[in-house]
Image (cartoon, rainbow, N blue to C red):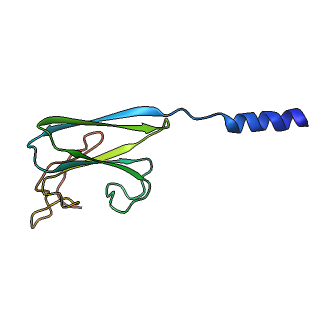
């Protein structure tokens, strides 16, 4: 009985090693404002990261060409959203049709579509 308890404790105590996930964003069209990167570990709230406690965020200075950031995460499946916050408003600026005025993106390069 004691051997089983020790074995169970040893299995629980094994640490999960974090991996470094590198996100590369580009092309960034100008140096105005910030680039916001949101990393989702679950579909909850995707693609909106505002007020989502399960999301890791990075706000990086915009730079021409590419911007890179890293996240230390346990092995798993993740999704990423990105937007270029040129006016530093904290949200995606859109026109009267709801089309973003600045750069936006998501992992796996999904096809853009109009409408719901």
* Farthest residue, direction right: 1
**Residue 29 position by quadrant:** top left
Picture quarter with the N terminus: top right
Could you tell whether 5 is left or right of 108 in the image?
Answer: right
Q: At 43% from the left edge and 58% from the top edge, which residue is drawn? A: 53
Name the foreground residue: 64 vs 76. 64
Q: At 74% from the left edge and 34% from the top edge, which residue is drawn? A: 10
Could you tell whether 7 is left or right of 69 in the image?
Answer: right
Percent x, y for residue 91? 22, 60
Name the foreground residue: 107 vs 30. 30
Percent x, y for residue 45? 38, 59
Name the foreground residue: 95 vs 115. 95
Picture quarter with the C terminus: bottom left
Above or below 8: residue 98: below
Could you tell whether 39 is left or right of 93 in the image?
Answer: right
Percent x, y for residue 43? 42, 53
Percent x, y for residue 20? 41, 32
Q: How many marks?
A: 0
Name the foreground residue: 61 vs 79. 61
* Farthest residue, direction bottom: 96
Q: At 8% from the left edge and 43% from the top edge, which residue is drawn? A: 30
Could you tell whether 92 is left or right of 5 in the image?
Answer: left
């Amino acid at each position: 009985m004691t051997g089983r308890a020790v074995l169970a404790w040893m299995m629980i105590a094994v640490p999960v090693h974090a991996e470094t996930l590198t996100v590369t964003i580009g092309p960034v069209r100008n140096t105005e404002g910030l680039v916001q990167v949101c990393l989702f570990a679950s579909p909850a709230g995707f693609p909106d990261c505002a007020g989502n406690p399960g999301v890791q965020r990075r706000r990086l200075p915009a730079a021409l060409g590419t911007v890179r950031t890293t996240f230390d995460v346990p092995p798993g499946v993740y999704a990423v959203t990105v937007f270029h916050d040129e006016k530093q408003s904290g949200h995606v600026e859109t026109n009267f049709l709801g089309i973003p005025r600045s750069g936006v993106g998501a992992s796996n390069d999904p096809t853009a579509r109009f409408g719901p």
